[in-house]
Image (cartoon, coloured by chain):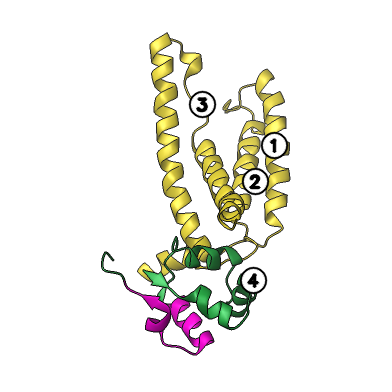
Chain colours: A yellow, B green
Amino acid sequence: MFEILLMIPKILFPRYFKWVGLVIYLIMFIYGGYYGQIYKLDDVNFSTGLYIQLGIFAGLIMMIYAKLKVEDEMTTQIRMVSLQWAILVFIILRITFKSIAFYYKNSDLLPKYQINSLLLIYLILLYSQVYFIPWVKSK
Amino acid sequence: MKNNIKVERAKKDMTQEDLAKEIGVSRQTIISIESGKYVPSTILALKIALYFKLSVEEIFILETND
């Protein structure tokens, strides 16, 4: 059982999935923005809202699980550490926005995006560590 | 943990990129190991030792506070 738990996160998409995911994410995000102004995304009578949300998730998942240029044991560790940090940052951000909403007694300020923003924070942390931080270190 | 990778690399007149390619990791990994920011797994340590034809203890040295 433990071997399976260790093995599954190592299965990754090919590299070009990063760009495919980015395109899907951006299209769905912009379209969702327009659509959300007219209708509610969570209106259960129309399935378009569900497809938009599925598209956003699919895009994010593709970007997250696309192979990096070189996959080795350090990138596996970077992925793990990024996820731990993402959860921490996500909780702090959510609680902060909730506190602000409660302070101003305004329910519009409540945080709306949930797992989306967790995945997005994870993605930013992962790529910033892979591309920027080692580059700074090498000087 | 200290390591002599930089010294051994200089003896062979290799760049970090060359060593990374030989061992099959990224250059960032070699940079991080050399600067002591990342501790490699046993497999990677053995691969590095095998490449330099040395024992692991000759490349990676345990410090008192480890």
Which of the two residues, A46 or B15, is positioned nearer the viewer here? B15
CB contact under 8 Å: marks 3 and 1: no
**Location of residue B51 in the rendering, given as x and y in whole percent from the top left corner:** 53, 85
- Provide the residue designation for mark 2: A59
| Residue bounds of the magenta highlight | B43-62
Q: In the image, what residue occupies the spot 43% across and 9% down?
A: A104
Check the picture and name the quadrant holding the C terminus of chain B: bottom left
Amino acid type assigned to the residue bearing label 3 in the image: Lys
Tag 2 and tag 3, C-beta contact below 8 Å: no
Q: Which residue is mark 1?
A: A28
List x then y, in percent, for residue A5.
41, 64
Residue A49 picture quarter: top right
> Which of labels 4 and 3 is toward the front?
4
Q: Which mark is residue B17?
A: 4
Snapshot quadrant of residue B62: bottom left
Which residue sits at x=65%, y=62%?
A69
> Mark 4 against mark 2, which lies toward the viewer?
4
Q: Identify the secondary structure beneath mark 3.
A: loop
Is A9 placed above or below B52 here?
A: above
Q: Quadrant of residue A13?
A: bottom right
Residue B60 falls inside the magenta stretch: yes
Where residue A63 appears, as percent x and y from the top left, is 63, 50
Q: Earlier in the sequence, mark 2 or mark 1?
A: 1
In contact (CB < 8 Å): disc 2 and disc 1 = yes
Chain name for mark 2: A
Query: Does A32 appear above or below A121?
Result: above
Chain ID for label 3?
A: A
Label ID, residue A112: 3
